[in-house]
Image (cartoon, grey):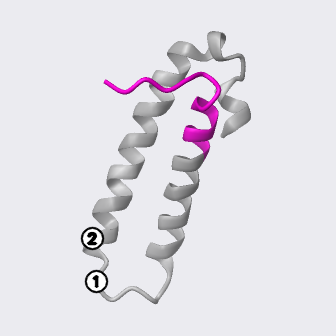
Amino acid sequence: MITISNQYAPLLISAVRDAVLYHEGLLRSETLRDRSDYEEHHLQLTIFLEHLKKEYKAQEEEIGLPLDQIL
């Protein structure tokens, strides 16, 4: 298990969300020849983001910053 301090939890959520959005844009672009690796990576990022959001919600009061303000 990894322990992330409350101070860095919002940054982690934001960074992973940005990565998901970046890969969504990349998958829509015409610059990729082989999308399969990127599609799998995007799927894993999306699953990871959902897991982080669930974990964050459980600690939201302690962290002091609502998840809605990060997303």
Along the line of sight, the residue nearer the viewer: 9 or 43: 9
The residue that label 1 is drawn on is 34
Disc 1 and disc 2 in contact, CB within 8 angstroms? yes
- The residue that appears at 32% across and 66% down in the rendered structure is 39
x, y percentage for residue 15? Answer: 57, 49
Along the line of sight, the residue nearer the viewer: 39 or 52: 52
Quadrant of image for the N terminus = top left
Is 19 drawn above or below residue 13 in the view shown? below
Range of residues picked out in magenta: 1-14
Which element is circle 1 on? loop
Is 2 drawn above or below residue 23 in the view shown? above
Is 66 drawn above or below residue 10 in the view shown? above
- The residue that appears at 39% across and 85% down in the rendered structure is 32
x, y percentage for residue 51? Answer: 40, 32
> In the rendered view, does 61 fall on the left or right side of 53?
right
Residue 37 is marked as: 2
- The residue that appears at 41% across and 48% down in the rendered structure is 46
Which element is circle 2 on? helix
Spatial CA span between label 1 and label 2: 7 Å
Q: Which of the 4 image quarters holds residue 67?
A: top right
